[in-house]
Image (cartoon, grey):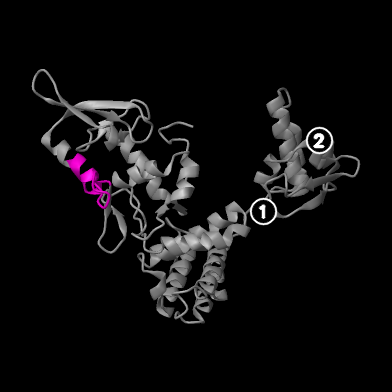
Amino acid sequence: MSRSYKSVRLKKNRGYSTEDIQRACAVNANTVSNWRKAGLQPSDPKRPYVFRGGLVTAFHKARQERLRTRLNTGEFKCTGCKSAVFPDLGSLKLTRASNGANMAFGQCSDCGCHVRKFVAEADLGVFEQLRNPNTTVDSSHEEIGRDPGGIGISTETDAPRWWLSNDRVVYDWQVHAGRLAEQTVDQHLSAIRFMEEVLHGKPFDRLTIRDVNLVLSALKEAMATNGEGKKSRSTASHQASQIMSFLEWLIKQDGYKRLPADLPSYIQLPKSAYAKAMPKAEKAYASLEEAEALLDGMPTLTLAERRARAMFAIAFLGALRADTITSLRLAHFDQEGRKIIQDATATRTKNGKASESVGSRSPRCLSTL
């Protein structure tokens, strides 16, 4: 793994504990602690810390970007992990060069490589600040600041806004949702973060019926709009159901039991909202005859072309999703029984469904396989 952490793919909507970040980035607890001192903001002051995945990614990206401009006070350029880092204080040594300037030597707090640079009085002040375990130097980082209310807000106009006050309860929900597939968890988290964005980060322990109604109105507007932020009927319906499921879990948790018991019922979309989102004209779809004609015209000279032709035929034979088709193997085809076996344990299927598709739609498509 690259020590610049470019290959680490943390999901922006998820919460991560210190142990989760250690496993994902292959680092120890001291490294995560050094990141926190260098400006990585936890979601709240409580321990064990919880970090938003998107903020961890933004933190590493900001350190990479600073190497192209200028270092912050107290930072060193590490040639090992290619980041702007603060040194490991236990290894820090100060000497005076022949020209009278102060020179600092040390080790990178992330990868252990040697770092050095000429330092000024301001750098020395940061080093002293770092020695205090109860303070951080995130004030020197303009990319990610700390709001007095515990809400992380980026100062860059084109950067996303981070609401952090609910990350801990969302992290608890992630543990509860461990029985679900990863893709399903991501979809639920997207719906929960949508509700959080509509309510401008309002803590979930203070939710009211009016708040849930605002989220419902936002879903209706997203279905009716034609511009940016438009949601299809299916997406809005799924997100409403996912938010309802989250609220049903939330009102049973300690500290949230005083919320209205009927809170989840206020997120149900009315039938009239679906009607407004219905397309005005039906889309044109290719017939089986047109599909066969297209199949006959596909090239078959190279292995890649024959593979593309076979995948096109499979789509019409088994009516499978594109992601499922790309994960199929030869063992999933029963040529004698004219079947395509959708094995949820070996292929990427929706909601872990398994089935057998009978290839009787078109003999010509079947012969392609």
Q: Amino acid at mark 2?
A: Leu
Q: Residue furthest top?
A: 98
**Marker count (numbered):** 2
Q: Residues within 10 Å of mark 2 (few under 14, many from 20)?
A: some
* SS assignment at label 1: helix
Is residue 232 visible from the viewing direction of this image?
A: no
Instruction: Determine crowd level at label 1: few under 14, some 14-19, many 20+ residues with C-alpha closer than 10 A.
Output: some
Q: Which residue is mark 1?
A: 350
The answer to which of marks 2 and 1 sits earlier in the sequence is 1
Q: Which residue is mark 2?
A: 369
**Residue 344, above or below 83:** below
Identity of the residue drawn at 46% across and 52% down = 16
Look at the numbered disc 2 and give the secondary structure of its residue: loop
Whether residue 128 is in magenta: the answer is: yes
Residue 250 x %, y %: 50, 71
130 part of magenta stretch: yes
Magenta-drawn segment: 126-143
Give coordinates of residue 171: x percent, y percent.
Answer: 48, 59
Question: In the picture shown, does residue 33 fall above or below 265?
Answer: above
Residue in the foreground of this view, choosing between 94 and 192? 94
Image point (50%, 59%), residue name: 189
Q: Position of residue 303 (x, y in %)?
A: 71, 25
The spot of residue 129 in percent (x, y) is: 20, 45
Callout 2 touching callout 1 (CB < 8 Å): no
